Image: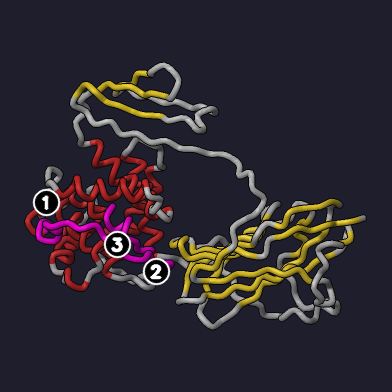
């Protein structure tokens, strides 16, 4: 699951296999021998052969992927028919329906797909199998396309996914991957009937567009109204726009949402550093403190951006005569990513358990530098996060 460790994650294994198979079917090159080895492993999982922490949800997902590539054995289909759907979370029940439908058991599959569809809304998991409402609805849409592609509910689920994308509610890589794949399959079934229309920019001539495609990249649209109209043809025009730029303000937002993270700089004697007078060449110990204020949180990333005048010297401090005040056994770290401009720490947080991380910096450039805030967020639920401890540092010769 993390580079350099032996821990595995069943859902992630099947997920990676799933999208490699989709890539291969879409025409991208994936080594065939490698794919066959993957499918052999998925067959073992689908059959329930001993695998650590294997659940029915994992067996069903593996069977779902195998069904799509024509590798689902009849004995696994028999197992699927005898699974009690009442004990499954919705996304697993939908994948069960998809596996049965693709393997020719449409009647059994139809009973597992809801008739009256209501978009799922619930808080994403921060670990486990990374469940979320967007991913659940994406799996539902893909299942519907396998069970009854002409059903009226497919339009409802697709519209809901697009609306949540527009509202910025695709929170994780899982959401993006499953939703984009499901919507891609949904649109592929839609009629390619043409259309034509226009784009009007305030104070300028009208531009024409049609179903062959249209794109416009401009740096001077700020403050102007832009309108789009489609007036001929039976096709549906889907569009998007994106604005980007560099903030002109100096302040960075600071907040605590479900967790709290703080940073302080200490000298070698554990005294607070005067950030208005840091000597060039001196060593500074950075201490990051983090805690959950609500519930246990998995897959938390602590993102400590460095002031430009500092560089990381030692990210793995141990007890020494000069730094004996640093605990020998620090907080548990799942993975650490050391970059030129930041240190990334991946860990889990728990309520009532404030953890500290220590590492060493060196002042390498004289001048006045912004201190970016230290930030933390759940990778699979970024609504839970914290940002704090920004400021300014003066490094003098």
Label placed on residue 121: 3
Work out whether residue 308 or residue 107 is closer to the camera in this orientation and state it.
Answer: 308
Work out whether residue 192 or residue 123 is closer to the camera in this orientation and state it.
Answer: 123
Mark 3: secondary structure: loop
294 in relation to 187, above or below: below
Please provide the residue range marked out in magenta. Answer: 109-138
Q: Check disc 1 and report the residue beneath it.
A: 104
Q: Check disc 2 and report the residue beneath it.
A: 128
Which numbered mark, 1 or 3, is in the foreground of this view? 3
Q: Earlier in the sequence, mark 3 or mark 2?
A: 3
Work out whether residue 289 or residue 331 is closer to the camera in this orientation and state it.
Answer: 289
Name the spot of residue 241 as percent of width and height, x first: 42, 35
State the predominant SS element of the stretch in magenta.
Answer: loop
- State the separation of the CA atoms marked 3 and 2: 18 Å
- State the separation of the CA atoms marked 1 and 3: 31 Å
Q: Is residue 128 magenta?
A: yes
Farthest residue in the top direction?
A: 205
Residue appearing at x 37%, y 73% in the figure: 53
166 in relation to 271, above or below: above
Number of residues whose C-alpha sits closer than 10 Å to that of mark 1, classed few (under 14), some (14–19) or many (20 or more): some
Query: In the rendered view, does 283 fall on the left or right side of 120?
Result: right
Query: In the rendered view, does 355 fall on the left or right side of 76?
Result: right
């Amino acid at each position: 699951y993390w580079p350099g460790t032996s821990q595995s994650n069943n859902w992630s294994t099947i997920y990676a296999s799933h999208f490699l198979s989709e890539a291969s079917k879409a025409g991208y090159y994936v080594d065939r021998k490698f794919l066959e080895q993957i499918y052999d492993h998925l067959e073992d999982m689908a059959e329930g052969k001993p695998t650590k922490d294997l659940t029915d949800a994992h067996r069903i997902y593996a069977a779902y992927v195998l069904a799509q590539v024509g590798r689902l054995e009849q004995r696994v289909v028999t197992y699927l028919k005898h699974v009690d759907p009442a004990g499954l979370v919705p996304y697993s029940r939908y994948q069960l329906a998809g596996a049965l439908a693709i393997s020719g058991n449409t009647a059994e599959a139809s009973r597992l797909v809801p008739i009256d569809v209501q978009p799922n809304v619930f808080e994403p998991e921060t670990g486990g199998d990374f469940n979320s409402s967007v991913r659940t609805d994406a799996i539902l849409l893909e299942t519907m396309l396998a069970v009854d592609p002409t059903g009226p509910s497919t339009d409802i689920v697709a519209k809901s996914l697009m609306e949540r994308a527009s509202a910025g509610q695709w929170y994780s890589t899982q959401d993006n991957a499953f939703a984009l794949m499901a919507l891609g399959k949904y649109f592929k079934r839609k009629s390619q009937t043409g259309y034509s229309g226009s784009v009007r920019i305030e104070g300028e001539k009208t531009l024409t567009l049609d179903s062959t495609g249209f794109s416009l990249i401009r740096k001077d649209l700020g403050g102007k109204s832009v309108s789009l109209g489609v007036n001929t043809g039976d096709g549906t025009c889907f569009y998007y726009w994106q604005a980007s730029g560099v903030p002109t303000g100096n302040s960075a937002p600071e907040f605590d949402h479900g967790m709290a993270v703080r940073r302080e700089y200490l000298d070698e004697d554990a005294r607070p550093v005067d950030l208005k007078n840091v000597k060039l060449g001196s060593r500074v110990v950075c201490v990051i403190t983090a805690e959950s204020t609500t519930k246990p949180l998995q897959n938390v990333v602590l993102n400590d951006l460095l002031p430009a005048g500092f560089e990381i010297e030692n990210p793995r401090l141990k007890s020494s005569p000069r730094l004996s005040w640093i605990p020998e056994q620090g907080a548990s770290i799942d993975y650490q990513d050391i970059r030129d401009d930041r240190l990334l720490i991946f860990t889990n947080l728990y309520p009532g358990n404030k953890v500290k991380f220590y590492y060493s910096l060196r002042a390498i450039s004289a001048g006045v530098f912004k201190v970016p805030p230290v930030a933390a967020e759940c990778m699979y639920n970024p609504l839970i996060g914290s940002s704090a401890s920004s400021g300014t540092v003066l490094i003098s010769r």
